[in-house]
């Protein structure tokens, strides 16, 4: 694991500059192996799975929406649908993710996207002092207080986490 100013994806590095988050460059971590999944990122960092912030793109009535979710949880698409007042919500296809955000699946950061989209952040992220999110590619992550992450993403805090089934 290494750190350096040049580690962030160029689009994400520019977003950090625009947001005045220049010091965040020094905390970006790059891994030799991809950390495309939350489990891979948690293992590489040595942190809890729930301390990873997943950036997931969905299509709500055809419009992209970003959902920020802790790495140990799954998104309840029905709760997202209700939250948005949408008829239908589905996972966005890889080409839609790249077109909307400017990043490939597995490296989508919570902000610094090509286009502005609606952002929902699950409340579960707020249970941590720090969460780790992708910095624009599958090899890089950065730490941030979840409240700051939500603010910079322009997210609305919601409850869209899939609840465990009870028998």
Image (cartoon, helix red, strand yellow):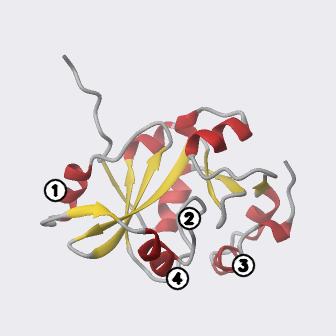
Residue at 51% x, 75% y: name it.
98
Residue at 43% x, 80% y: name it.
116
Circles 1, 2 touching at the beta carbon (< 8 Å): no
User: Alpha-carbon distance for marks 1 and 2?
Assistant: 24 Å
In x, y percent, where is residue 154? 44, 68
Residue 126 is left or right of residue 158, and the answer is: right
Q: Earlier in the sequence, mark 4 or mark 3?
A: 3
Q: Any mark on residue 108, and which?
A: 2
The residue beneath circle 3 is 10
Furthest residue toward top: 167
User: Alpha-carbon distance for marks 1 and 4?
Assistant: 26 Å
Q: Residues within 10 Å of mark 3 (few under 14, many from 20)?
A: few
User: Alpha-carbon distance for marks 4 and 2?
Assistant: 11 Å
The residue beneath circle 1 is 82
The residue beneath circle 4 is 114
**Residue 98 drawn above or below residue 55:** below
Q: Earlier in the sequence, mark 4 or mark 2?
A: 2
Q: Any mark on residue 101, and which?
A: none
**Residue 52 drawn above or below residue 3:** above
Q: Nearer the viewer, mark 1 or mark 2?
A: 2
Q: Secondary structure at mark 4?
A: loop
In x, y percent, where is residue 79? 21, 50
User: Alpha-carbon distance for marks 3 and 2?
Assistant: 13 Å
Residue 47 is left or right of residue 155, and the answer is: right
Quarter residue 91 falls in: bottom left
């Amino acid at each position: 694991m290494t750190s350096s100013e040049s580690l962030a994806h160029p689009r994400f590095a520019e977003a950090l500059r625009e947001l005045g988050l220049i010091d965040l460059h020094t905390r970006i971590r790059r891994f030799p192996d991809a950390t495309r999944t939350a489990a891979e990122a948690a293992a590489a960092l040595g942190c809890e799975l729930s301390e990873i912030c997943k950036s997931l793109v969905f299509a709500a009535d055809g419009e992209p929406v970003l959902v920020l979710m802790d790495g140990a949880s799954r998104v309840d698409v029905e709760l997202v649908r209700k939250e948005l007042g949408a008829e239908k919500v589905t996972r966005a296809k890889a080409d839609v993710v790249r077109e909307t955000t400017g990043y490939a699946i597995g490296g989508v950061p919570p902000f610094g996207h090509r286009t502005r989209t609606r952002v929902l952040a699950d409340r579960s992220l707020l249970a941590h002092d720090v969460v780790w999110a992708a910095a624009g590619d599958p090899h890089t992550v950065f730490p941030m207080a979840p409240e700051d992450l939500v603010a910079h993403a322009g997210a609305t805090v919601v409850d869209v986490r899939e609840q465990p089934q009870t028998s």
